[in-house]
Amino acid sequence: MAADRTDAVRTAYLEGRSIASLAREYDVSRGAIRTAVADLLPEHIAEGQQDVPTPGLPVTLDMPGKVADFLRATELEPDERAALDQGVTVRRGQGYTLRVSTTRAVHRQLLARCQPLDGGHGTPTVPAQRKARREYENRVSALIPTGP
C-alpha cells in the first residue's frame, strides 16, 4: 500500500474500524491491511510489551446502568457523548450494563465526570449510585496503570 493510504488505514483502525471493512474500502487484501497495522494488532502488543499501555486503542468496559444514566444527563464532550451513544445495552436482572468501547483517556474522562455520585459538596449520597461509580472506577483502574 502507498504511504498516504497506510496512514489513513492506521487512523481508521485506531478509531475502531475492522480489518475486513478497511480491506473492502481500500480494495486490498486483509493481509495488506494487517501488514499496515501490524504494530497495532493485539498479538504484537502482547509480545514483550504487556506492561506498556497503548492509549489509542479502544478498550471495552461494562459501565453500570446507574453511572450511564447519570452521564447521559450530564453535559459531555463530543467524544464522551459518542462513546455513550455507541454503547451496547446488556440487561442484568432488573437493571442494565452499558458496554462502552472507547480509548482509555475517554474512560478516565467519563469516570471523572461521574464523581458527584460519591456525594459531598452539598450533594446527597445515594448508596446504589455510589456503589455503581466505585465499580466503574475499579474497572477503569484495572485497565490503566497509575505510574508514569
Image (spheres, rainbow, N blue to C red):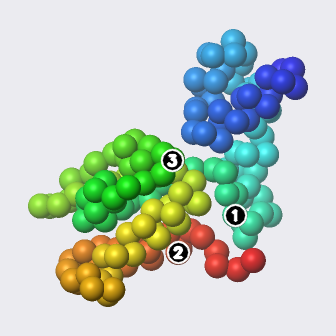
* Label 1: which secondary element: loop
Camera-side residue of 19 and 123:
123
Residue type, mark 3 in image: Asp
Q: Quadrant of the C terminus?
A: bottom right
Mark number, residue 90: none
- Residue at 45 percent across and 76 percent down: it is 138
* Horizontal relation, residue 25 to residue 83: left or right: right
- Residue at 69 percent across and 16 percent down: it is 26
Which comes sooner in the sequence, label 2 or label 3? 3
* Label 2: which secondary element: helix
Where in the figure is residue 60, as x and y percent of width and height? 48, 54
Residue type, mark 1 in image: Pro
Q: Which residue is mark 2?
A: 141
Q: Is residue 87 above or below residue 107?
A: above
Q: Which residue is mark 1?
A: 53
- The quadrant in which residue 134 appears is bottom left
Camera-side residue of 126 and 146:
126
Q: CA distance from mark 3 to mark 1?
A: 20 Å
Residue type, mark 2 in image: Ser
